[in-house]
Image (spheres, rainbow, N blue to C red):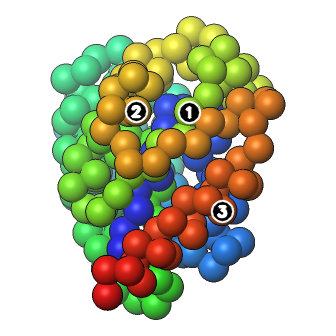
Amino acid sequence: MRLGVTGGIGSGKTSVCRVFNTLGIPVFSADPEARRIMESDPAVIEGINAVAGRDLYPAGMLDKMVLAKLIFNDPEKLKKVNSLVHPVVFRAFTDWVKDQSAPYVIMEAAILFESGGNELVDKVLSVLAPEKERVERVMHRNMLSREQVMERMRNQISDEKRIELSDYLIFNSENDMIIPSVLKIHFEILADITGSN
């Protein structure tokens, strides 16, 4: 069984996945994998430079700030870069799944729905948090301005849409306890798996 875990930037997906991981559930994190691919896959590097119209790897490393400026304000460029990176990430996930032996696995991806990654999983869990808290978290964590965080948020689907498309929800506000929510979903999934065999 494959569970997709998603949520807007700063919602706390990684914290939720850490709890699942503690329960022995393997987690494939799509975002670091995408970053690794953008740094190491020759076809992707060539494609990114073509979309940018210049070399974004001046020192042999991707200039992430320049790329972010380019794509977060240009939906067309963002789409092109995503179409280079996502298929490679999805192949890596599919290969990774074959090596796992846990009752179920998790694919953690910020843009699970936007990228079509939800097609690769059986169920989806969305992590939700108030926008104000999310903005504060990301500004603090990534050293970004409020405007930069809002730019990134505008390229993600709304929480309303996420709720509509998800099988499970976890609310991760300052006052919410995520561990009981994770445990409840974990045991529900295990019951579903054993019940369906």
Q: Residues within 10 Å of mark 3 (few under 14, many from 20)?
A: some
Quickly name the residue at label 3: 183
Q: Which mark is residue 128?
A: 1
Nearer to the camera, 181 or 148: 181
Residue 2 location, x and y as percent?
37, 68
Instruction: Give the labeled residue for mark 2.
Output: 163
Tell me if 90 is positioned left or right of 14 in this view.
left
Say the numbered circle drawn on residue 136.
Answer: none
Disc 2 vs disc 1: Cβ atoms closer than 8 Å? yes
The quarter of the rendered structure image containing the N terminus is bottom left
Q: Which kind of residue does numbered mark 2 sit on?
A: Ile
Q: Mark 1: few, some, or many residues within 10 Å (few <14, many ≥20)? A: many
The answer to whether residue 163 is above or below residue 196 is above
Q: Residue at x 50, y 60 (%)?
A: 29
**Farthest-out residue, front:** 195
Query: Callout 3, which amino acid?
Result: Leu
Quarter where residue 149 is shown? top right
